[in-house]
Amino acid sequence: MKLREAISALKKMRDVRIDDTLLFHWLSELDGRVQTEIMLAEIADVFGYSVDQYDAQLLVLPPHDGMYLDWLMCKTAEYYGEFDRAQYHRAEFERKYKKYAAWYMNQYRPAARKRKEQERWISME
């Protein structure tokens, strides 16, 4: 899913009068979380999105990319003070996020990869 598609889907699901800059920030925040918590990227390697990157591909691909809409619905509901709705979408988001994390960690084993990199650096010293 591209940023444009995520924002467009959100705007089809509900009336949103929030500047796209904030929506980009929320999507960057989520992809930053994915990069650090799941992919175990170093902070210096984490990237986000700027407003001119409407066609940028979000990190999480199908079938797990539905988490982006729940994330945006949650953040939007929080923005408007709709806390019951936000709680529902946060729960859906967390369920999908955990499912993606389990799949990614099983598929790519980022902790094992990171450990091997550290061992390699230690052996070079």
Image: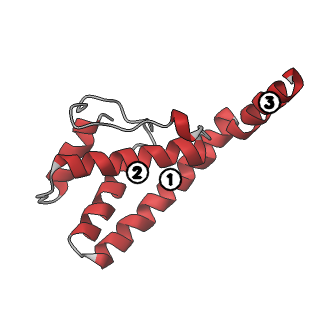
Q: Residue at x 24, y 76 (%)?
A: 81
Q: Residue at x 40, y 65 (%)?
A: 90
| Three-letter code for the amino acid on which mark 2 is drawn | Met
The residue under label 2 is 67
Give coordinates of residue 57: x percent, y percent. 35, 30
Figure quadrant of the C terminus: top right
The residue under label 3 is 116
Disc nearer the start of the sequence (2/3): 2
**Dot 1 surroundings within 10 Å: few (below 14), some, or many (20 or more)?**
many
Task: Count the numbered circles shown.
Answer: 3
Alpha carbons under labels 2 and 3: distance apart: 30 Å
Tag 2 secondary structure: helix
**Residue contact between numbered discs 2 and 3, judged by CB atoms under 8 Å:** no
Q: Determine which of the numbered discs, if any, sits on residue 97 in the image.
A: 1
Position of 75 relative to 112 (above/below): below
**Dot 3 surroundings within 10 Å: few (below 14), some, or many (20 or more)?**
few
